[in-house]
Image: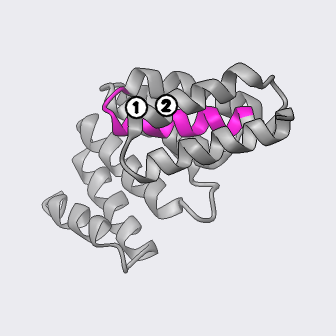
Amino acid sequence: MIRETRLRHLLDTAETHARGGRRNRAVSFYRKVLALTQDGEFERELAHVRLADLHLALGQAESAALHVRRAIALSGGEPDYALMLGRALLAQGRAEEAMPHLHEAMASPVRAAEALAALAHGEDALGNRRTAGHLARLAAERDPASAAWRALARDLADA
């Protein structure tokens, strides 16, 4: 099987496992992608970011941060990846370190509301509840259809 076909098959299989909730199996297939690729190949970047996402879902924030840092380096600074790194750092209780990455994530035209909500969580973790409430309200305004952002704004309404 030629290399490109093998990579495509591994990626497809990993995605199938991830969609089916078989996260550990998906991790195994993404690791196989990493073993076959080199820096500069998009498949390697994709495998790292998907591994980061899977590790976050598995509650393995430290592993997630390692993979997303690698994806950021390979991508040259993708704002969506900065959001993922910020979330991984928040999950590790490292809110202060997460904040610059979450601010960077605001550059994502698609994920700005998510970045605002993550910033709200970070500010709340740092004890800045008033700022957290303001950011949560901005997230809810940016994406009024999101029940999660509205709930966050309600949770921080006393701020």
In percent of width and height, residue 125 lies at 26, 36
> Quick one: SS at disc 1?
helix
Asked whether the viewer can see residue 78, the reply is yes
Left or right: 151, with 37 as reference point: left
Q: Which residues are magenta?
A: 44-60
Name of the residue lying farthest toward the front: 1
In percent of width and height, residue 137 lies at 32, 67
In percent of width and height, residue 121 lies at 31, 46
The secondary structure that most of the magenta stretch takes on is: helix
Tell me if mark 1 has few (under 14), some (14-19) or many (20+) residues whose alpha carbon lies within 10 angstroms of its own: some
In percent of width and height, residue 52 lies at 50, 34
At x 32%, y 42%, the residue is 123
At x 62%, y 57%, the residue is 108
Q: Tag 2: residue type?
A: Val
> Where is mark 2, residue-wise?
27
At x 28%, y 34%, the residue is 126
Task: Say which of 3 and 158 sits in front.
Answer: 3
> Quick one: SS at disc 2?
helix
Q: Tag 1: residue type?
A: Asn
Asked whether the viewer can see residue 100, the reply is no
The label number, if any, that marks residue 24 in the structure image? 1
Q: Is residue 49 magenta?
A: yes
Discs 1, 2 touching: Cβ within 8 Å: yes
